[in-house]
Image (cartoon, rainbow, N blue to C red):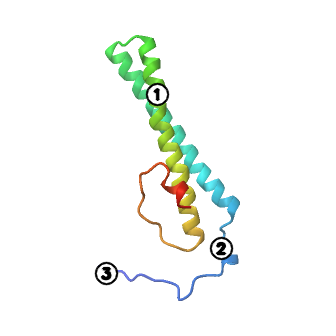
Amino acid sequence: MEQEILKPEAAPKAGSQAFSRTGSLMAAFGATLLMLCFTGSAMVATVWAMSKLIGLPDMLMYVLLALGVLPVLWVTIWTAGRAWHVEKLLAAHKDIDVPVFSLTYYFKNG
């Protein structure tokens, strides 16, 4: 089954699109907040469950929770940069590029 890809003959005028700086900021902030909440809650649940299953002392569990904040912060910061980058691409009527998993890539290039 073949499908035909339909493309407009010309890009729509910028004023006719629903992209605004405020809307882009809200979308990027929403994606960032989702990643913070989801990865944070997953990290807390995993560390708590494993420490209770193994029988680790509470103090060691708190240390593991404090260490678990680092990957959560990395994911949150990276998501903020990537989401803003994607919003800028969409506002410029460009295709989304392949993600680069570097913490500062989107803040240096953009």
Q: Residue at x 70, y 77 (%)?
A: 15
**Residue 37, horizontal then vertical, whole percent:** 54, 38
Q: Residue at x 41, y 81 (%)?
A: 5
Q: Is residue 59 above or below residue 36?
A: above
Q: Quick one: 68 or 6, which is closer to the camera?
A: 68
Mark positioned earlier in the residue sequence (1 or 2): 2
**Residue under label 1:** 44
**Element at badge 2?**
loop
Say which label, 3 or 2, has the lower sequence index: 3
Whole-percent x, y for residue 42 in the image: 44, 33
Mark 3 nearby-residue class (10 Å; few <14, some 14–19, many ≥20): few
Name of the residue lying farthest toward the top: 57
Query: Tag 3, which secondary structure?
Result: loop
The residue pinned by badge 2 equals 17
**Residue visible at 46% across and 28% down in the picture:** 44
Residue 5 placement, left or right of 54: right
Task: Give the percent coordinates (x, y) of residue 49.
Answer: 39, 22
Task: Give the amino acid type for the residue marked by disc 2 in the picture.
Answer: Gln
Give how far apart the Cα atoms at labels 3 and 1 are. 47 Å
Question: At label 3, which amino acid type do we have?
Answer: Glu
Q: Quadrant of the N terminus?
A: bottom left
Q: Quadrant of residue 24?
A: bottom right
Q: Quadrant of the C terminus?
A: bottom right
Q: Earlier in the sequence, mark 3 or mark 1?
A: 3
Residue found at the far front of this picture: 108
Q: Amino acid at mark 1?
A: Val
Q: What secondary structure is found at the residue carrying circle 1?
A: helix
27 and 64: which is toward the camera: 64
State the residue position of label 3: 2
Do the residues bearing badges 3 and 1 touch, measured as CB atoms within 8 Å? no
> Compared to 42, does 108 lie above or below?
below
* Neighbours of disc 2 within 10 Å: few (<14), some (14-19), many (20+): few
